[in-house]
Image (tube, helix red, strand yellow):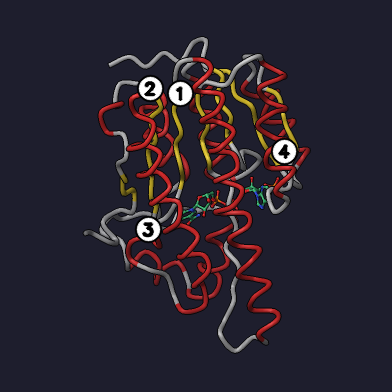
Amino acid sequence: MRIDLTGQIILVTGASRGIGAEIARQLAASCATVAVHFSASSASAEALCAEIGNDARAFQADLADSVAADGLFTAVREAYGRVDCVVNNAGIAVHSPLEKSLETWVADWDKTLDVNSRATAIITRASVAHFKEIGGGRLIYVSSRAAFRGDSEDYLAYAASKGAMVSLVRSIARGFGKQNIKAFNVAPGFVRTDMAQDAIDAYGEDFVLGGIALDRLTEPKDVAPMIVLLASGLSDHATGCSIDINAASYVH
Ligand SMILES: NC(=O)c1ccc[n+]([C@@H]2O[C@H](COP(=O)([O-])OP(=O)(O)OC[C@H]3O[C@@H](n4cnc5c(N)ncnc54)[C@H](OP(=O)(O)O)[C@@H]3O)[C@@H](O)[C@H]2O)c1
């Protein structure tokens, strides 16, 4: 099977680091033009654009801000003239034990859902409107094993925000399939990035490794190929699906 994404304009949110950066690399390696979104990490986003080429450009937006989230899609569409696919990957995981004060715990909850769920919904809304105009498109979401298995009691908002993504994918897939709009969910387990490092530091790598069936921790390069395949259109009849990439740490 050869995957050729020549001519596709693909927005990847949270592409400045971690899983998103590797998704951008692998999409560009299959000849897509990638809009590299970042919030704080401008230098790494610019460096990634230079590395992957093919007219990749960096776009800044703090996705905690709903206006900025909507503006991101508009900026990419105006820069390239069209968007064929969006990979909703940006996300945060805030350590938020129930012992925190109500005010702080609620602030953590709101920020997590603002970035992981609300911004994703806003970008979805803008994408669907654009895809209807251009005759179709693909939405790919990076949720988490936490959406299905649950997370620890210190990450309730994170798990809830990822659960919301799963129902969003299913609704978009069912609601807009006849308009040639497809939606897919990819659900990783622990992946070696800055986000996972806190847990690795806290519990040790052996603890994390002990939870998976394979002999090494999942890395961004193990997740990105599935996104490339879904973006290609070769798996369109999987629309609405959730694909686990968690090294059999959770099987359901
Ligand atoms: N790593 C894991 O173990 C794991 C497991 C399951 C699912 N996931 C999911 O995979 C996705 C990528 O995770 P990762 O591990 O690659 O995380 P990461 O290394 O922490 O990178 C997070 C990315 O999201 C962006 N981001 C963070 N806050 C943002 C905000 N307020 N507005 C806009 N962008 C923001 C960051 O941009 P800047 O640096 O530019 O601010 C960065 O590009 C997330 O949705 C995460 O929930 C990760």
Say what amino acid the circle numbered 4 marks.
Answer: Ser
Q: Are marks 2 and 1 in contact (CB under 8 Å)?
A: yes
N-terminal label among 2 and 4: 4
Give the Cα separation between the discs numbered 4 and 1.
28 Å
* Farthest-out residue, top: 7
Q: Which residue appears at 39% of the width and 35% of the height?
A: 183
Numbered tag placed on residue 207 in the rendering: none
Where in the figure is residue 1, as x and y percent of width and height? 27, 16
Give the Cα separation between the discs numbered 2 and 3.
28 Å
Q: Is 83 positioned to the left or the right of 70 in the image? A: left
Give the Cα separation between the discs numbered 2 and 1.
7 Å
| Label 3 SS | loop
Q: Residues within 10 Å of mark 4 (few under 14, many from 20)?
A: some
* Farthest-out residue, left: 252
| Label 1 SS | strand
Q: Label 3: which residue?
A: 145
Q: In the figure, 170 relative to 194: above or below? A: above
Q: Label 4: which residue?
A: 44
Q: Label 2: which residue?
A: 180
Q: Residues within 10 Å of mark 2 (few under 14, many from 20)?
A: some
Give the Cα separation between the discs numbered 1 and 3.
25 Å
N-terminal label among 2 and 1: 1
Nearer the observer: mark 2 or 3; the answer is 2
Say what amino acid the circle numbered 3 marks.
Answer: Arg
Which quadrant would residue 48 be assigned to in this image?
A: top right
Q: Label 1: which residue?
A: 137
Where in the figure is residue 125, as x and y percent of width and height? 55, 37
Q: Residues within 10 Å of mark 1 (few under 14, many from 20)?
A: many
Give the Cα separation between the discs numbered 2 and 4.
34 Å
* Beta carbon at label 3 within 8 Å of ligand 1: yes
